[in-house]
Amino acid sequence: MKVLVIGSGGREHALVWKLKQSKLDPELFWAPGNGGYKGFAQCVNISAENVEDILDFCMGKKIDFVVVGPEAPLALGIVDKLNKKNIKVFGPTKAASQLEISKVFTKLFCQKNGIPSAKFWIFDDSKKVTDFLQSRELPYPLVLKADGLAAGKGVIIAEDANHAVEAANKIMVQKKFGNAGNKIVIEEFLAGNEASIMALCDGEKSLILPTARDYKRALDEDKGENTGGMGAVSPSPVVSENDKKNNLLNEIKFKIIDKTLQAMADAGNPFKGVLYAGLMLTDEGPKLLEFNVRFGDPETQVVLPRLKEDLLTILIESSEGKITKNELSLSQNKCVTVVAASKGYPSSYSKGFEIKGIKMAEENGCIVFHAGTKREGEKILTNGGRVLNVTAFGETYNEAREKVYKGLEKIDFEGITYRKDIARI
Ligand code: AMP
Ligand code: GLY
């Protein structure tokens, strides 16, 4: 069967890597792909947001199944459009994607359906926000979030009223995140450990994927700006996958994931695809920070290597609304990934530098998922902010992390930067 994966990051490289192992022996296409395609998939030079050209390609090539990686094409309604052409696809419809596309939608959805999340205020007018922030005693720090999609960067934590006014201005007046900042959500700050819980959903039923934690800040010890993610570990150090009597994971499944599926189905927008819950584990229990409606990046790079299942079969079942399993089979190993980034990321950075040493890292026991890379002849060049995801297994976090950092020592490109504290648990 012919399968098309959409996207160009490390998440998509991990997807094609895992799909390639399927017993269905798919012929894989990847739009637009990255420098990691060799031996896995045929790249198709169409960007993930170019929905019309993707549709044409699928029709022309008679693609049997499409797997959508990033949120942008989901927000453009790619799933609805493929469905209309009778092309099978894994991912939520545009209406179901509201859970990620709009933080305002999600806050109101949580409130209505009793899904635990932070207290909040919503504004669509910059003057009203400033008045609100200047006229009240508020419990700082506060969290300010652009309503729309902002590549994981639209969240600002403000320590005091001045900082909050400045942040609201950045989002709503200076439009640092474009139209995503037309509305703003202000949230109470939640303290606790974070966890990323993803579930494969078929509209009614969910299968919890291996748990994970990502490291969102640019610098060691969770300092610096928020990024798309600088590393990840699986399982989450704070959400046990094994202890069936420890009901934290069950609580998350029932109170957050399944409740959401039920409410979306009741509203006529059944959710099929990956539902990703970014959670804060507070003293009052798990609370939702955000939903994503697709695989997390870089969480996928540590989750899929631990999954002892035929991913393609399950994705097809999810898309058809008939997941057959009740539980996924997982490796008991730990998995760690560290993002090797371009100097300057998440702000401005240069591209086009040659990357050396990938093979040596692989020979040292790492899986190297490409993210912002491209091939030029035999050379592999940097082509983005997050360049490589160097990944390894171990019986302990420490064993996996040591393998990753040894692998990273073998890799070099101009301006390579990475956090040194990933998986120091
Ligand atoms: P989000 O994109 O909503 O997941 O937010 C990005 C990051 O900001 C999260 O991973 C948290 O580290 C932090 N964050 C978001 N909302 C809150 C909150 N209400 N309290 C504390 N930290 C938060
Ligand atoms: N790692 C967070 C995300 O994928 O949005």
Image (cartoon, grey):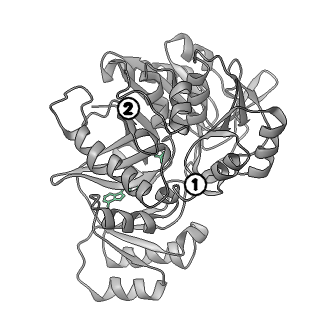
Q: Please name the residue shown 31% across and 50% down the image.
A: 256
Instruction: Point out the residue furthest to the top here.
Output: 363
Q: Which amino acid does label 1 sit on?
A: Ser
Q: Position of residue 117 (x, y in %)?
A: 29, 60
Q: Quadrant of residue 163?
A: bottom left
The local crowd at label 1, few if under 14, some if 14 to 19, many if 20 or more residues have their Cα within 10 Å, is few
In-image side of 65 versus 181 (left or right): right
Q: In which quarter of the image is residue 276?
A: top left
Q: Please name the residue shown 41% across and 35% down the image.
A: 232
Who comes first in sequence, dot 1 or dot 2? 2
The reply to whether the residue tagged 1 has its Cβ within 8 angstroms of ligand 1 is no
- In this rendering, is residue 337 above or below 385? above
Q: Name the residue under label 1.
A: 347
The C terminus lies in quadrant:
top left
Q: Please name the residue shown 60% across and 57% down the image.
A: 75
Q: Where is residue 105 in the image (x, y as percent from the top left)?
A: 44, 66
Q: Which of 175 and 180 is in front in this view?
A: 180
Q: Mark 2 points at which residue?
A: 233
